[in-house]
Amino acid sequence: MTSNIKLNSSLLAFFICINFSFAQEWNLVWEDNFESQGAINSENWFHQTLLPNGYSWYNSELQHYTNRIENSYVEDGLLKIVAIKEPFTDQGHTKSYTSARLNSKFSFKYCKIEIRAKLPYGQGTWPAIWTLGKDIIEPGGYWTESGFGTSAWPACGEIDIMEHWGSNQNFVQSATHTPSSYGGTINHGGQWISTASSQHHTYGLEWTEEKLVFSVDDVVHYTYNPPIKNSNTWPFDAEQYLILNIAISPDISPNFVQSALEIDYVRVYQTADQNTGGSSDISGCTDPNAVNYNSNASIQAVDQYGNMLCTYTACNQVPSQGCMYTNAFAPWHEFFNASDCSNYGGTPCDGGAAIGIGCIDINATNYNIDASIQAEDQYGNLVCTYASCNQVPSEGCMYIDAFAPWNQYFNAADCSNYGGTPCEGEPEVIEGCMDVTALNYTANATIEDNTCEYPCEVNWNIIVTDQNHSIFIDGPWININGNPLAEGSIIGVFYQNEDGILGCAGYTTIAEGIAQISVMGDDTTTEGIDGLIAGQQFTYRIWDASSCEEYGAVLTYLNGPETYTSNGISFVNSVTGTAFGANAQTIELPEGWFIFSSHMIPENVDIASVLSPILENIIIAKDYLGLAYLPEWNFNGIGDMKVGEGYQIKMNVAADLTIVGVQILPEESTIEFIAGWSILGYLRAEAAPVNLVLASLVADGNLIIVKNSNGLAYLPQWDFNGIGTMNPGEGYQIKTNISGIFEYLANHLSY
């Protein structure tokens, strides 16, 4: 991770720093085995939560770091740093994710570090175990706030013991950042750990005066040993401290909910002659009149500007005339007076009249007509806000609540890194989602393009009626990709109402053990259809919590009816996701005789109901036994259509027959046929060669002949195929030697 550019980290690291030589004996000088329960040990760790630039963290990261127990706690011997997707407002800014960033209160030089950790999972997660120089200037950091900040990043040096990006799952990297190479540093190496997020591994560093050696489970993957060691290449001759965190990068998956970095232990070893860490001096506010007085502090804490880190409620508590800030105090001196104090947002405490400060730019949205002095924040940025780059006073960086002109140390790239909008040349128009609660919130957008995407939610409303059918499910729950369904996924039973709109009759959330769906039946006392009717096939849908998509489902019944029955009970022992089938099939029926079949199960399987849309065009329909349906005489000798059977039909004019219902899963439908002649229905959605489809019957020596509506034949004994392919909507006369059963392949498989 890059300091002042890097935020989050997760992993196990064994810190070992030492002046290395053969036969050296390592002595444990600092450790945390996380043996308590609940809050972390505040004697060892500090929560770093302050946004370092006042608006965001580095690298366009999306999280707030908090000191809440939800984001960092100890449980069952493990430290857990948890990144959570949730809107959270802090320091005047709302962000969509929370996490934790811990600073060690122990610093060290030349050592061996070991950290045993299991990493979080998910695209966009960025856990890290790393160190920064104790002398870094970073607002809100423990050692900066304790008065040690004298060097900027990367001059302070950064050592990344372990970094992991969820977009490159199971690859862990180590790196260094120095003035000679930082940010996209060339000094890095790593290795693949196939169980990085499912098992604990020991991440190690050995730091000597000559080199840094990085390893996982004692397998070395990178050594940093520059041939020339100076302040540009080797700032690692001073104390560093440890950081543990998880950052959230802009490519976070919209399906991310939460994940944790779990750490078993942190250990730092040194040799007797290299024990440099662990000063017992405590830094804090030493003024008893301050709100944050620390009676244990022996060193007055100061910030990077030399201000005392003591807070006061009023000027009558401050130790001298000076500037009272929200979290610090600065006495007057020859280069700093009341006017400067007001410019920096402080309150002058010298008995003088209040000075009006604020935004004095009339083009700003927060223009203060009463202000005589331009307000600036602690970074020297103008505390003026603008609607767009068209209103800013000069080229520079437009933040949500401030503006910073360009200077030789600050340019457009820096502006973007800190979450601002560069304003240079012609004002840039950036379209995007401007709702911070949206999944695709665009921080630098200037125009709302109405593309905001929000967390998916299932919206299956159920009408409770006076009757129901209980379905009990106990068995594996498999998604459409063949993997276990994600926790929180839902399965429901559906019906079509009188307007053809799909309604949910009942659903349940996946669970360990037995889950129950109470399927509502139609209430006959109401006009509309609000549930299933007796004998109606169950139609299932799955809502997958991991992908926010809906798809079909196939259930294996162990016992009980597979159709709706009032007060019925059915038992299911497996649920498997499948792609939605079509909800209708259109069959072209020519004038004259034709053999048809369907791969749909209509809601009403009575053949008279199925053929009712083309009733006036039908002369006769027959099944393979010769039983007939004669609409002119209102005679139905066939009754219900059967899955897997075909029917002869004679039309007085060509017409299209559309059958609405549930698509049959051919692999789940066993067709029984008799010896001699029968009519085979075709259940697949795509055509396939007849010789391949019926190859199993040929192999058994059972198939004699197949004929289509035109009398074209397939004669396996003669290896003659006059039919070609079997087609959806058509039926086929077959003659077999003996009775038997037959099944088609699934639609997604090929013959």
Image (spheres, rainbow, N blue to C red):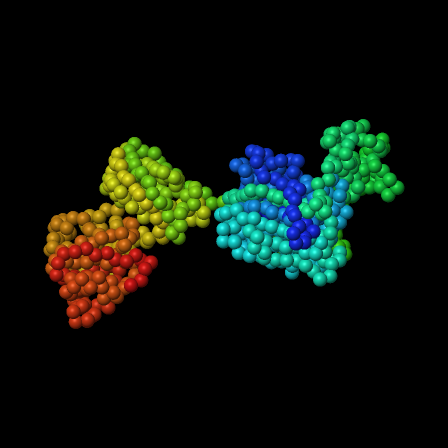
Left or right: residue 710 compared with residue 422: left
Residue situated in front as seen by the camera: 579 or 289: 289
Which residue does the image show at 84% across and 41% down from the upper left? 336
Counting every numbered tag in the picture gives 0
Q: Is residue 597 above or below residue 83?
A: below
Left or right: residue 31 compared with residue 353: left
Q: Is residue 683 above or below residue 283?
A: below
Which residue does the image show at 19% across and 55% down from the upper left? 741
User: Which x, y percent locates residue 643?
Assistant: 22, 52
User: Which x, y percent locates residue 31?
Assistant: 63, 41
Q: For the C terminus, give its image quadrant.
A: bottom left
Using the rendered image of the protein, determine whether residue 275 is visible from the camera's viewpoint. yes
Give the residue at the far right of this rendering. 334
Left or right: residue 680 compared with residue 92: left
Residue situated in front as seen by the camera: 620 or 256: 256
Which residue does the image show at 65% across and 39% down from the upper left? 45
Left or right: residue 561 compared with residue 130: left
Which residue does the image show at 22% across and 64% down from the upper left? 695
Give the residue at the far front of this rendering. 23
User: Which x, y percent locates residue 347?
Assistant: 79, 35
Residue situated in front as seen by the camera: 251 or 308: 308
Using the rendered image of the protein, determine whether residue 423 is visible from the camera's viewpoint. no
User: Which x, y percent locates residue 370?
Assistant: 78, 38
